Structure formats: structure tokens, C-alpha cells
Amino acid sequence: MNVGSPFLLSPAGKDYLWGGSRLKDDYAKELDMSPLAETWECSTHPDGPSIVASGPNQGKLLSDVIKDHPEYLGTRPLAMMTEEEIAKGDIPILIKFIDAKKDLSVQVHPSDEYAKKEEGGQRGKTEMWYVLDAKKDSSLIYGFHHDISKKKLEKSLKAGTVERYLQKVSVKKDDVFLIKAGTVHAIGAGIMVAEIQESSNLTYRMYDYNRLGKDGKPRELHIEKSLAVANLKHSQIPRQPIRTLQFRPGVASELLCRCKYFQTKRLMINTEVYKKMISVSADPSSFQVLLCYDGCGLLIPENGDVLPFFKGDCIFVPAANSGEFKLHGKAKLLRVNC
């Protein structure tokens, strides 16, 4: 296998109390956790690093591989990063699967500016969700119905009445949501998402329905920091973006989200009838991540071994030396780059 060929990643897992079992049951995640709330599929974050699962670097931390080969990131990510981040083998984004069997806490993430100043130079957190599945009548929280003052919000948090001010949005499979830093939000029960975000684990928990943690005590809240970063203005109900499917033989694709941190497209390949494989060009300006959320197939590099992939698999495509690669099979994937 060429040293710059695409490779599979093995995720880190999180057993948060609101998680379920679908990541094991539906996505074949073989992690010894119950519940299994999240899998961090492509991550160099120290709180949940990914491990290379194929190729000459199999068994190594993804961060160690990037440390040895920063050219894998491409020119755009390298331009976004500090010398210290590059030296650590950092990747500026983090990709997850999330299974919310129960409601997540009401939370907010800081901006880059706040995190840099108040959290020791860390990144803030803007994120997007692609809804993989949602039970009937599922909803998420997105901001407030009306403008609210900091004093009123603080009082409602202490009194446990904040839910009356929060805006709920109905959710269905295939929806897309961009959650900018500062937006108060929560994924609701019965929703599964793929999350693409800045590489950050800064979450300020505002309200948690008075739930108890594994230790039998109420989970920690971060009221002061939440109030410092939350957008208290009325939030417009997020409209689904206009999505235009582009077709060529064997594949349909569409842009789901583009922001300053990442771009996410959806690919639907089907070469069972179309007998030629799909050609995909590597991007010298950015690495790519292919997240398979349905079906299975083969990735065939220009120079290297064939890489089979299945539902739930995550593939890292280096920016350098990858050339063109081909896809074959019947599958749905998210294609993420910076």
C-alpha cells in the first residue's frame, strides 16, 4: 500500500447516560460500553483519539500519523492551524456518530475567541448535524422563542423553569442543522446524527432535567460560562438548506453544509447496474473523510490495495499522494473536507 493511500479509522467511544445501543446494533460498533452514546470516528482530540485500522500505520494513533505526515492535511487545514497544533498532529475537525436514546442536556459551546482567551487557547465549537434517523415526533432544542435577558435566564435556570423559553424544532430523517457557537441547543430523544464539528470538547451544560450521574449526584452545570457565551436573542427556526442533487452515472451527490471550518457533501453510489466504478479526485488542498452510514462498497486507490468498507466505517483520505481513487458498490456516504 502506498504510504499516502486512504485508510480506515477505529473510533473512541463515550458511554454518556443518555446513549442507547443502536451504534452497536445498527452500525456494528464493537466497543465494550453500555450505553454507547457516541463514537468519535475521526478524531485527534486527546479526549477521544481515533486509531488507524488499516494499512502500514495500522494500530497507531491518527495524531501520530499526522505528526509524521503533516502534508496529509493539505494546504487549507495547515493554514488554519498554529505551529503547536501542527506539531501535535492535530486535525481541525472531529466527526462523530451520536445515538440519543434520551434527551441530551441543554448546552452551549463557546466561540473560538472566548475559548482561546478563557480555555487555555482551545478551539470553540461550531457543529453540524446530519440526521440519520429520528423517531416520530422527535425534536431538538434550538435557541429561544423570544429575546431573553441574562438575568431572566439565570433566574429560570435556578428555578428549573428554563424549558418554557426554549425553542423546539421538529426533526426528521435526512435533515441538516448547523449549530453555530453560542447557540443554546440539545438533541432530543430518539434521534441519531452524524456530527461534524470543530475539534473541541468544550461543552457548557446549562440544564440537565435534574438528572443524576453514575455517582448518584446531579451532573455538573456550567451556568456562569453558559451565560457568558450564549446568544440570548430570539433564534429563527432553522430552515432546511436548499439542496440540489447532481447526477452522473452511478452516483448522486449534494452539498449539505459549508462553513468556515468544514464542508460536507452526501454521496449516494450505486454501481450495481452502472458497471463502471466511480472516479473521485483527491483534493491536494485538504484531506477528506468518507463516513459510510448505509450500504457497503470498495475504495480502490490509484496505487494501493483495495479497501472494503461497510456501514459505520470511516475512511481518511490524505491530501498528499493519493491521486484519484474509485468507489464501487451500493452505499451512502458523507464526504467531509476543510
Image (cartoon, rainbow, N blue to C red):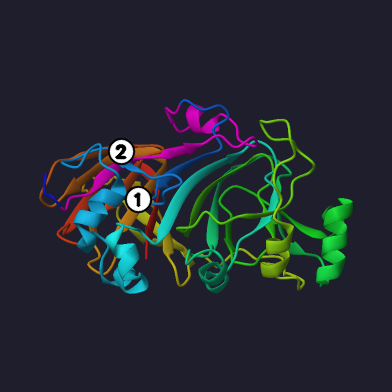
Q: Which residues are magenta?
A: 4-31
Crowd class of label 1 (few under 14; some 14 to 19; many from 20; radius 10 Å) = many
Rendering quarter of residue 138: top right
Residue 2: say if magenta: no
The numbered mark at residue 290 is 1
Determine the secondary structure under disc 1: strand
Residue 24: say if magenta: yes
Q: Residue at x 20, y 63 (%)?
A: 71
Please tell me whether residue 17 is drawn above or below residue 71 in the rendered image.
above
Q: Are marks 2 and 1 in contact (CB under 8 Å)?
A: yes
The numbered mark at residue 200 is none
Q: Earlier in the sequence, mark 2 or mark 1?
A: 1
Amino acid type at mark 2: Phe
Magenta: main secondary structure equals loop
Q: Where in the figure is residue 82, as x and y percent of width and height?
A: 35, 70
Q: Which quarter of the figure is the C terminus placed in? A: bottom left
Taking the image as shown, residue 316 lies to the left or right of residue 142, namely left
Q: Which quarter of the figure is the N terminus placed in? A: top left
Taking the image as shown, residue 151 lies to the left or right of residue 194, namely right
Q: Residue at x 55, y 47 (%)?
A: 193
Q: Where in the figure is residue 109, as x and y percent of width and height?
A: 61, 61
Q: Is residue 155 visible?
A: yes
Please tell me whether residue 98 is drawn above or below residue 71 in the rendered image.
above
Task: Name the residue nearer the viewer: 312 or 199.
Answer: 199
Rendering quarter of residue 284: bottom left
Q: Which residue is mark 2?
A: 309
Q: Is residue 328 visible?
A: no
Taking the image as shown, residue 256 lies to the left or right of residue 50, namely right
Task: Name the residue nearer the viewer: 155 or 20.
Answer: 155
Determine the secondary structure under disc 2: strand
Q: How many marks?
A: 2
